[in-house]
Amino acid sequence: MEEEKLAAIDADRYDFYVDHMYVDRIDSREYKHKKARLIYADGGIIHVFTTTKHWYLPARFYMWIPANTTYHLESTSSRIPLYSFYFKQQQHMPSVLSTPNIFLSNDLVREMFLFAQDWSGGVSKTADYSKYCLLRAMMAIIPDTSSPIDAFPMQHPYPKSEKLRSVARYLNSNIDQAYTIEQIAAQFGMSSRSLSRLFKEDMGISYIRFLRAIRIAKALELMSENSYSILEIAMRVGYNELSSFSNIFTRVTGIRPSIYMAKINGYKE
């Protein structure tokens, strides 16, 4: 995102800012805006990382990122239509909009997104009254028509240190491999004890728990595509036995994989 655009997004003269694009691979730089950001992808999968959590955002859902939240986005999906709406901070925001949350895009909200798909740039009450009214209505109806979705439990800690972020990227790129902490430590020129201590100090969880979390995050992504059986997904994320995958998936998410797949596809119908 260019510096000029970042400055325009935060400019006080705009009540809202609209910025839509097609992305093949999202820029993973960290951002922090004076305005809240609503993001909606009409396809693919987006991973949203705040300083404390990793959020999983599938197609047909949207995420509210409050103002002054540090975050970055990642995606391995190709040619994603990414809709972004920025909202000036209000004095009395509904509590549901005070923290990052994921919402189901119902028909009304999605039609609003699509109606504004050709808009671009800043919106103010005096210069763009019709656009201003729609965006103000959009922000007003979200708390009344949507509730945070409980079907996306992947809100696990994400590394703060660049060393662990490099480890995380490596594990994600080789998610089907069963690497031990000793193998990963050697890969990054560390002792297994040092790497284990770094996980505990930086994230408060063990290497094994983090590896499980990113495997399940990838499994959730594959499930949303509705192209693979549960066994195929288990194999793709490094589990050789369906029972082992099913048990760990249930332990991490609180729901059986078969029930989750039915639930997520039910939301999309």
Image (cartoon, rainbow, N blue to C red):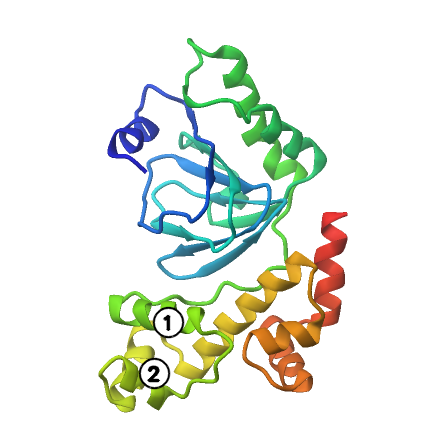
- Which label belongs to residue 247? none
Q: Residue furthest top?
A: 126
The residue at which mark 2 appears reads as 184
| Residue drawn where x is 62% and y is 76% of the image | 234
The reply to whether dot 1 and dot 2 touch (C-beta < 8 Å) is yes
Q: Which of the 4 image quarters holds residue 91? A: top left
Q: Residue 214 vs residue 107: left or right? A: left
Looking at the image, the residue that sits furthest to the left is: 189
> Is 31 located above or below residue 261 in the figure?
above
Which quadrant, please, contains the N terminus?
Answer: top left
57 sits left or right of 9 in the view: right
Q: Position of residue 69 (x, y in %)?
A: 36, 47
User: Left of 238 or right of it: where is 34?
Assistant: left
Q: Is residue 131 left or right of residue 52?
A: right
Q: Nearer the viewer, residue 220 or 222?
A: 222
In this rendering, the answer to whether 16 lies above or below 147 is above
Q: Which residue is mark 1?
A: 170
Q: Earlier in the sequence, mark 1 or mark 2?
A: 1
Q: How much space separates mark 1 and mark 2, taking CA atoms?
A: 9 Å
Q: Is residue 177 visible?
A: yes
Q: Position of residue 106 (x, y in %)?
A: 69, 39
Tell me where residue 178 appears, x and y as whole percent. Answer: 48, 84
Q: Amino acid at mark 2?
A: Ile
At a point 43% along the width and 43% down the height, the residue shown is 66
